[in-house]
Image (cartoon, rainbow, N blue to C red):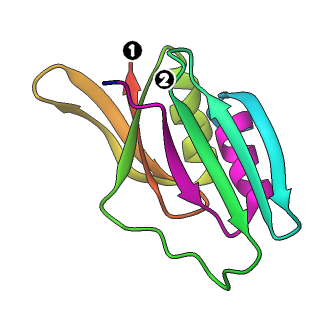
Amino acid sequence: MNIQWVTIMVDDLEKSKEFYGEYLGLTLKDAFSPDETMSIVFYEAENQMQIELIKNKNLQEVTNATGVSIGIATDRYDELLENARERKIITVEPQILGGHLECFFVKDPNNVGIQVIKA
């Protein structure tokens, strides 16, 4: 079994695109609108795992579940940490988990937790 993507319903597609594309540096894979009320954007990681962002204009407000996080391992750890501090988006400062896993946590514009892991 392979997980292909994680879908996130978003309130502000532009802020979400900036976070996943500019901040995290994922690659824009696809963007389309199946109709006039919906926009869908896919970003891809180096291992081909994708993040799907959906903006549905028919939804008044999106409330994403708290307690959900996406783990992203990166060799740009120090750069992302510094940038996260500048943006004031860190929710948990760097720590060592399990005796070996260095990571910190941020929130995306949709309140989804992102665990940034030192590769």
Residue 10 percent location from the top left of the image: 64, 64
Q: Residues within 10 Å of mark 2 (few under 14, many from 20)?
A: some
- Residue under circle 2? 77
Residue 79 percent location from the top left of the image: 58, 25
Residue pushed farthest left? 99
Q: Residue at x 38, y 21 (%)?
A: 118
**Which mark is drawn over residue 51?**
none
Residue 95 vs residue 118, the one in the foreground: 118
Residue 22 percent location from the top left of the image: 74, 35
Tell me if residue 15 comes above or below residue 60 in the rendering: above
Q: Please state the extent of the stretch shown in magenta in the rendering.
A: 2-21
Where, by quadrant of the figure, is residue 101 drawn? Answer: top left
96 left or right, relative to 35: left
- Residue under circle 1? 119
The mark nearer the N terminus, 1 or 2, is: 2
Q: Residue at x 28, y 26 (%)?
A: 102
Residue 25 vs residue 37, the one in the foreground: 37
6 left or right, relative to 10: left
Foreground label between 1 and 2: 1
